[in-house]
Image: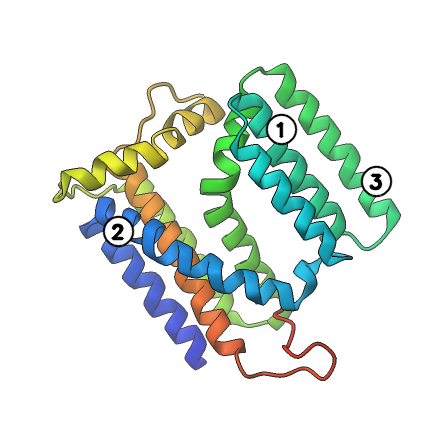
């Protein structure tokens, strides 16, 4: 096992253990402390790579869209803005030909029609994209891609451990009590809509931000941020003749 892989495993297990012991406190710590540090360093890292977009100016447009989206009071329109930005970015950054872009666009249109016909789906996707999808599904995709490109069995094992940790939290939720009640109230203010959104998505009525969901959010948020810090640290100092920094795989 390489040093970085061992660190990744250690941090993942640490986040998993802490999510069982202090889920409410860990979620707020990750969101308030680790989150801003993560985005502050990641923006600079992405800027050096032109945000993986054809032109840096597109990132400025997306930033304006984000500011405007924050001012949208309608949940469905906010969800449409989030979904549209995600689709456009995927077309610009993840496709390599006009045919691929067209296919992705057609799939996105079909999914948009399905969500629109079901009424609340756009509002649900607007809640889940910047929260649970961003920090769990995207992290999982990047881990799988990294393991596939490197051909590393150890990194593949890390993906399995990550999935087992998520499954364990869902099937054997922690019984930790709230030690700082104000943390639970703040957590409800920031993440209280995640439970109902998941309930609508999976048809589970009455789903709320309980200890199980809080522990899940605490784990995926914490590991998402810690995973980034390890990548950023390991890539620091590795220069590329063309752009200054080596492109992270």
Query: Quick check: 229 left or right of 114?
Result: left
Query: Quick check: 187 left or right of 82?
Result: left
Q: Secondary structure at mark 2?
A: helix
The mark nearer the N terminus, 3 or 2, is 2
Query: Is residue 154 visible in the rendered structure shown here?
Result: no
**Residue, x 53% and y 38% (percent of image)?**
129
Where 61 falls versus 108 (above or below)?
below
Query: Quick check: 185 left or right of 151?
Result: left
- Residue named by callout 3: 102
**Residue, x 61% and y 46% (percent of image)?**
63
Question: Which label sits in the foreground, 3 or 2?
Answer: 2
Question: Which label sits in the foreground, 3 or 1?
Answer: 1
Query: Decide: marks 3, 1 in contact (CB < 8 A)?
Result: no
In-front residue for pair 213/68: 68
Q: Position of residue 243 (x, y in %)?
A: 70, 76
In-front residue for pair 136/165: 136
Q: Secondary structure at mark 1?
A: helix
The Cα atoms of the two marked residues, 2 and 1, are separated by 31 Å
User: For the N terminus, which image quadrant?
Assistant: bottom left
**Residue, x 67% and y 66% (percent of image)?**
49
- Residue named by callout 2: 26
Q: Residues within 10 Å of mark 1 (few under 14, many from 20)?
A: many
Q: Residues within 10 Å of mark 3 (few under 14, many from 20)?
A: few
Q: Position of residue 44 (x, y in %)?
A: 56, 65
Query: Is residue 10 visible in the rendered structure shown here?
Result: yes
Query: Decide: marks 3, 2 in contact (CB < 8 A)?
Result: no
- Residue named by callout 1: 80
Residue furthest out toward the right: 98
**Number of labelled discs?**
3
The Cα atoms of the two marked residues, 3 and 1, are separated by 19 Å
């Amino acid at each position: 096992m390489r040093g970085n892989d061992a660190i990744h495993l250690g941090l993942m297990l640490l986040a998993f253990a802490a999510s069982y012991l202090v889920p409410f406190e860990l979620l707020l710590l990750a969101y308030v402390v680790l989150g801003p540090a993560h985005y502050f360093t990641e923006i600079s890292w992405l800027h050096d790579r032109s945000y993986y977009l054809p032109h840096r100016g597109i990132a400025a447009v997306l930033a304006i869209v984000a500011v405007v989206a924050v001012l949208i009071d309608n949940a469905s329109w906010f969800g449409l803005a989030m979904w549209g930005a995600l689709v456009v970015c995927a077309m610009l950054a993840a496709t390599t030909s006009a045919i691929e872009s067209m296919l992705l666009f057609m799939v996105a249109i079909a999914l948009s029609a399905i969500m629109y016909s079901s009424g609340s789906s756009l509002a649900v996707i607007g809640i889940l994209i910047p929260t649970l999808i961003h920090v769990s599904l995207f992290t999982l995709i990047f881990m799988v891609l990294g393991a596939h490109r490197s051909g590393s069995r150890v990194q593949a094992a890390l993906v399995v451990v990550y999935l087992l940790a998520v499954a364990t939290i869902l099937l054997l939720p922690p019984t930790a009590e709230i030690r700082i009640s104000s943390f639970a109230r703040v957590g409800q203010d920031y993440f209280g809509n995640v439970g109902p959104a998941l309930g609508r998505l999976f048809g589970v009525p009455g789903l709320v931000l309980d200890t199980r969901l809080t522990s899940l959010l605490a784990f995926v948020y914490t590991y998402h941020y810690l995973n980034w810090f390890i990548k950023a640290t390991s890539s620091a100092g590795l220069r590329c003749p063309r752009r200054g920094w080596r492109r992270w795989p």
